Amino acid sequence: MEHPEIDFATVLASAVHDMKNSLCMLIQSMDMLQQDLAPQSDTASQELARIHYEASRLNTNLMQLLSLYRIEKDQLPLHLDEYFIEDLLEEVVIKNEMYSQQKHIAVQVETENHLSWFFDNDLVSNLINDMFVNALRYSSGKLLLKAGTEDGQLCLELHDDGAGFPDFMLENNDSSMNQFNLAAGRTGLGLFFAHLIAKAHRNQGRHGRIELSNGGRYGGGVFRLLLP
């Protein structure tokens, strides 16, 4: 008997959708539990915040997995629309508020007044959220999300007060997939995903890009996303 041909992209999309729904329900339940646990047990509250953090990372990774597969198959159309940047950044902060509060990390948001831009909101918000979650892990106590314009492009910046990006990451700032160390803690799939999403945004002969550096507002790592 012949086996039916399997459309892996469809199966993957369906599986990721189901897993994301389950994870979203778990994250919502943890948000509710945190409100009850916080006054009663600091230890339990901290553990719940850690679990919430890992669930959020897993949710982001599922989106990256599906997006990377679609990019490889040229099946990742961009859904461009105009969005207010302040809303985008505030949503990222709120999503990770439980973990940032438990880690006593002060998060500051700076944006130009009424700044808006055209981009794929799902992809860009997932990208920024992943970089933000990663920065929470390495930050000592301060994070800055900053948005403005530079040379006719949208510029989103994330500054932390950690130890900064290692030299090999700064040297391979615009590397291909096979040059990334996927096992390293502060590189890998998320950074490669950021490169792909940035470059997929094109306008008037220019494409988006990401930049990594050390220093910035707090002396740690600085992640920059520029979109035309």
Image (cartoon, helix red, strand yellow):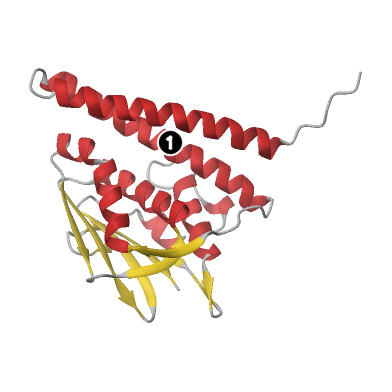
Residue drawn at (43%, 36%), measured in percent from left and top? 59
Up/down of 11 relative to 141, above or below: above
55 w.r.t. 129: above or below: above
The kind of residue tagged 1 is: Asn
Rendered location of residue 135, percent (x, y): 29, 48
Name the residue: 69% across, 50% down: 73
Question: Is residue 172 rendered to the left or right of residue 104?
Answer: right
Looking at the image, can residue 5 be seen? yes
Q: Which residue is mark 1?
A: 59
How far across and how far down the image is residue 99, in percent?
A: 22, 36
Between 121 and 209, the one nearer to me in the picture: 121
Which residue is at the front of the view, 213 or 124? 124
Residue 174 in sight: no
Within-10-Å neighbours for mark 1: few <14, some 14–19, many 20+: many
In the rendered image, which quarter contains the N terminus?
top right
State the residue at coordinates (46%, 64%). 81
Q: Is residue 190 left or right of residue 104?
A: right
